[in-house]
Structure formats: structure tokens, C-alpha cells
Image: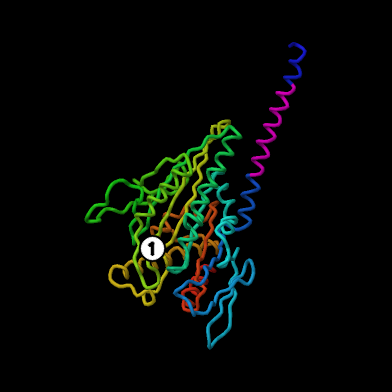
Amino acid sequence: AADTQPALDRLKADIRALEDQLAEEQKLRKKLHNQIQDMKGAIRVFCRFRPMIAREAGDAAVLTKADAFTARLQRPAPHNDNKPFSFDAVFDGDSTQEEVFADCRDLVQSAVDGYNVTVFAYGQTGAGKTHTMYGTPEQPGLAPRAIRALFDVISREQKAGKKKFKVKTYMIEVYKQDILDLLSDKPPPKDKKGVGLEVKKDIGRGMMYVEGVTERAVTTPEELMAALTEGEKKRHVTATKMNAASSRSHLLLSIIVECHVQDTDQVLYGKITLCDLAGSERPKKSEVEGEALKEAIEINKSLSALGDVIEALTKGNKSVPYRNHKLTMLMQDSLGGSAKTLMFVNCSPAGGNFEETQMSLKWASR
């Protein structure tokens, strides 16, 4: 036994050295990964347009994919000219949900590393935003895929040792000027007064939060998916001329990742916010009236405020108008600074939606 002890000590020393080397390489990998994300731009914009659908039979397709980064919009007769729009990526009607997610997967790692990440979908009602964000059981969208990827990353990092994770989630909708808790067990008051929650800043965690919102602890992707499904069922929708179930609110699923690094006793907080924005629309085209018209006006106001924030950030303005709407106040910690943002502009390729598609492409090009 005495003869083997020196050899065992050398092996233990070699193992410790390898563990230290691995820890240093992991730090470097994370640093390089986040540098690559920063080089891609704090705000990346992807364009996705859906295939033509049954109600557009006989209509001409006016939006096409010129290449991996360019969408081309053809103006209908008598103009018959076209305009290219450049983005960080372009996906057409043949692109699969997996292909779309492949370009977003790295953002999940950033959240585990302690960054705030936001993915949101913008576009006219009926353009495929909810399909992109949530999809179907057969074709899951970004949210369910990101949830699976998040727990895969956490499992891998915990197996490597020296880290413990906690995951919490909350789900809200911004309906008109109110923030509503979609995971609350309490029924909303009948008079609806005082139902809206307020946005506050959590200095300790370095993120915005909604005062009094239901934060639910989750330990598996299945628990998080169940919370997502529960919240989705409570969302405001209305039938319009453009869409049989048009979303009348902005839906935000926020996932807070707490990482305890045991060696240094450091606690890192990251957040993923997946936002399905309400559809932009022209009331004349969607033919809404009464309460639905009021909803449409509020939707367009909030989208205008979000556009102003993104434009200010991309131009590097010193003053960013986050406080102009509750939607932008909510997203303040996930837009600008060290946060990483990915925006999808969803479009219809049909000629009958030319004006709405042109407006969406111009908005996303800001």
C-alpha cells in the first residue's frame, strides 16, 4: 500500500489540475460565446413569412426570399417594382420550426450565464407570430424548444459539478394599459378595477419585476410547459376579419434562472423573456368596432412605443423612452445594455396584405 500511495497522490494531483483546466476553459468558452453574441448585435432581427393559406387562394405572392439575409417585396400592378429588406436572417414558408430555432439556441446559454435575453415576434394579425413562438404539439415553436434546451443546459452544467440552479417562471399579459397575472389562482375582480399590476426594479437581481405577480418554481421542462399552457388559455382573443382568434394582448413568459457557484459563493441571475406581441392592424382592414376597436388602438400605441425604444437603442441615443408604455417598462432589463434581444418580424406573403407587410418590414428595419 505504501508503494502505491505516491502514485495515487500523483493521480489525484493530475485530476485536480485537469479539473482546474476544465474550469478555466469553461470560463473562456462562456466569455467567447457571449462575445460572439455581442458581435452579432445587441438586437438581431429575423424575418419570417408563412406559406399562402386557403383564404388567399387566387392571390399573388408578393414577398419572396432573395437569399439568407434578404426578403424582397414586389409592389403589385401597375407599379410592378420591388424593394429588398435586409435582416440578420430570413425564413420563408418552407423553413421548419427546427431551422428557425437553430439560430436562437445559443441565447439559452447566455441566460444560464447570467444575461437577460428576450425573443419576441412582431407582425400583423394572422401573420404567424403565435405559430413561431408557441407552435403546435406536432410542430413546437420557440418557447417549448427553448424550455427543453434550457433544462438540457442546466442538467449538463450541474453534472459538471460546483453549480446549483433554481428556475422560476411568471406569465403575464399586457392588455390595454393593464398587466394581468396569468398564473394567479385568484379570480379577477368583477369590476376589473385595481386588477393591473405595477412594474418595479429589483436592484438585487438586476432585473425588472412585476409587483405581486405569481412566481412559480419549476424543476422540469414538463412543469414549465404546464405553466405555459395554463397561462395561454387565459389570454384575451377576439375574432376579426383578419384572424378567427386574434390576440388582443401582449403575452410575456419570463423564466428566471438563479445559479449558485459553490466555489465562489457567487449567485448569478439570468432571465429569458419570450414575448408574443399582439398583432399590429389597421382597424379599417380588420373591421373591428366597439371594445375590439379600443383594443386595436391600445395595441398600436404600445407597438409604436416599442419601436421608439428599439430605434433609440440602435442609434445609440443617450435617452431611451422606456417609460412611455408599460410594455417597454417591462422589457427595460431585456432591451439595451448587456441584454441580448432577438426580434422576429412575421409577415404574410399575399398581395392582399401588401400594405400591412410593407409596414411590418419598415417597422422592423428601424
Extreme residue in the right direction: 3
Q: The N terminus lies in which quarter of the figure? A: top right
The structure residue drawn at horizontal position 46% and vertical position 54%, both measured from the top left corner, is 332
Residue 305 location in percent, x, y? Answer: 43, 64
Instruction: Assess disc 1: are there few (<14), some (14-19) or many (≥20) residues with their C-alpha within 10 Å of its C-alpha.
Output: many
The structure residue drawn at horizontal position 58% and vertical position 80%, both measured from the top left corner, is 82
Q: Secondary structure at mark 1?
A: strand
Query: Which residue occupies the foreground of this view, 130 or 264?
Result: 130
Residue 338 location in percent, x, y? Answer: 55, 51
Extreme residue in the top direction: 2
Q: Is residue 146 above or below residue 132?
A: above
Whether residue 188 sits left or right of residue 34 in the image: it is left
Residue 87 location in percent, x, y? Answer: 59, 66
Residue ID for mark 1: 247
Magenta stretch contains residue 63: no
Query: Which residue occupies the foreground of this view, 115 or 128?
Result: 128
**Residue kind at label 1, given as amino acid type:** Ser
Q: For the magenta stretch, what is the residue range?
A: 10-29
Query: Which residue occupies the foreground of this view, 327 or 223?
Result: 223
Whether residue 122 sits left or right of residue 195 in the image: it is right
**In terms of image quadrants, where is residue 291?**
bottom left
Extreme residue in the bottom direction: 78
Chief secondary structure of the magenta portion: helix
Magenta stretch contains residue 14: yes
Residue 107 location in percent, x, y? Answer: 56, 51
The structure residue drawn at horizontal position 62% and vertical position 57%, both measured from the top left corner, is 40
Query: How are the colours assigned in the image?
Result: rainbow
